[in-house]
């Protein structure tokens, strides 16, 4: 099969190889998928750069965990009725070396999720990390109905879905954006109030909007840099659900202040989410996709042999939507 892989860590243009790779065959409990779209996410580029130093010990890595395609073969203990089913893939390159940046992938059958006919493969390839992470951030700590949620960086891949999930489940949503274009995306996702990034000024604007009442929860995409201004608007017993701290990977925290607020800090990583959380996310995603209620943004598409540029695009940032490799 045609695939892209790496055998050493480094810059995309230096280490990503394109060519023929051994086609995988499904083991018991697995399905074999003809991949049509592969989603590139920051965790994929970080792995390629060496975030997990032991990753290559088991051999070359075909990157990317998200994808979509069609089941073409099943292993033992999997119903043959699944052959021909359109699916989206999550955790593809987790616990194994071979991800979705190839013509074929084999995964446990529960990681191949039914993809409705009204949804493209490109859209399906963003359901794993972006949509599932956002769902967990919004729902992990109980109902948000009637609550006020702040979603920082609301135009980002995950936060854009977080706005949609929060609105779907009945919350009032305040979102932040760094530019007018970012703010436009936040509005499109359904935010009730859109402001600049957390600051002294936005603190005033938020409290004016809420009539002085502090907010219930935060979905945070850059934990370290936003923490202090976020604490100014978060209520005692509030919750911060965070999935990234890109600007400061090891932030200092005001422990005493946070302790006296009795805060909950919820870390979210889709790869190791509890299975019941994954199953609930999948059920809600499937329902929303069938009803056409999720707005899915494809920012850029690349050919498989142009994967280095796809990875570089993610590292550069600034995309409004997902970067997809079409296969």
Image (cartoon, rainbow, N blue to C red):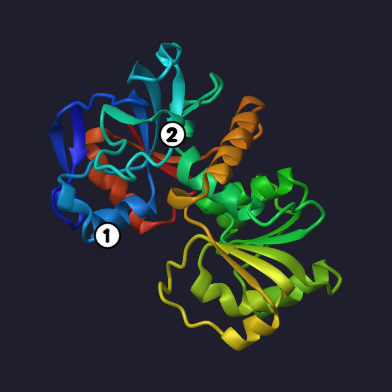
Taking 273 as reference, is 104 above or below it? above
Q: Is residue 216 left or right of residue 69?
A: right
**Quadrant of the image occupied by residue 289:** top right
The residue labelled by disc 2 is: 111
User: Residue 128: x percent and y percent?
Assistant: 47, 41
Give the numbered dot on residue 125. Answer: none
Give the numbered dot on residue 52. Answer: 1
Secondary structure at numbered mark 2: helix
Q: Is residue 32 left or right of residue 143?
A: left
User: Residue 258: x percent and y percent?
Assistant: 63, 81
Q: Is residue 324 left or right of residue 119?
A: left
Image quadrant holding the N terminus, namely top left
User: Residue 54: x percent and y percent?
Assistant: 21, 58
Residue at horizontal 43 percent and vertical 67 percent from the top:
246
How packed is label 2: few (under 14 Cα within 10 Å), some, or many (20 or more)? some
**Residue 295 seen:** no
User: Residue 19: x percent and y percent?
Assistant: 13, 33
Taking 18 as reference, is 163 above or below it? below
Taking 50 as reference, is 302 above or below it? above
Distance between mark 2 and mark 1 Cα atoms: 22 Å
Residue at horizontal 66 percent and vertical 74 percent from the top:
263
Comparing 220 with 272, the one in front is 272
**Residue 22 seen:** yes
Secondary structure at numbered mark 1: loop
**Mark 2–mark 1 CB contact (< 8 Å):** no
Residue at horizontal 55 percent and vertical 22 percent from the top:
116
**Quadrant of the image occupied by residue 82:** top left
How packed is label 1: few (under 14 Cα within 10 Å), some, or many (20 or more)? few
């Amino acid at each position: 099969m045609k695939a892209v892989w790496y055998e050493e860590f480094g810059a995309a243009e230096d280490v990503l190889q394109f060519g023929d790779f051994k086609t995988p065959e499904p083991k018991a409990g697995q399905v074999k998928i003809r991949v049509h779209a592969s989603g590139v996410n920051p965790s994929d580029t970080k792995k390629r750069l060496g975030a997990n130093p032991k990753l290559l010990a088991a051999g070359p890595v075909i990157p990317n965990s998200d994808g979509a395609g069609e089941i073409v073969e099943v292993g033992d203990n999997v119903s043959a009725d699944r052959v021909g089913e359109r699916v989206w893939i999550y955790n593809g390159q987790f616990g194994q070396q071979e991800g979705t940046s190839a013509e074929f992938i084999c995964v446990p059958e529960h990681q191949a999720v039914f993809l409705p006919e009204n949804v493209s493969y490109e859209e399906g390839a963003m359901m794993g990390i972006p949509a599932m992470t956002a769902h967990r951030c919004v729902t992990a700590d109980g109902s948000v109905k009637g609550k006020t949620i702040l979603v920082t960086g609301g135009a980002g891949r995950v936060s854009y879905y977080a706005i949609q999930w929060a609105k779907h489940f009945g919350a009032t949503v305040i979102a932040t954006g760094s530019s007018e274009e970012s703010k436009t995306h936040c509005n499109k996702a359904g935010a009730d109030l859109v402001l600049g990034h957390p600051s002294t000024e936005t603190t005033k604007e938020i409290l004016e909007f809420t009539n002085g009442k502090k907010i219930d929860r935060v979905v945070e995409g850059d934990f370290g840099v936003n923490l202090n201004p976020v604490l100014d608007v978060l209520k005692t017993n509030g919750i911060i659900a965070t999935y990234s701290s890109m600007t400061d990977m090891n932030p200092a925290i005001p422990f005493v202040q946070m302790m006296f607020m009795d805060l909950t800090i919820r870390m979210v990583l889709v790869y190791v989410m509890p299975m019941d959380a994954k199953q609930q996310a999948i059920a809600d995603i499937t329902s929303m996709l069938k009803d056409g209620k999720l707005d899915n943004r494809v920012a850029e598409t690349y050919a498989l042999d142009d994967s280095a540029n796809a990875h570089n695009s993610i590292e550069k940032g600034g995309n409004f939507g997902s970067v997809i490799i079409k296969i």
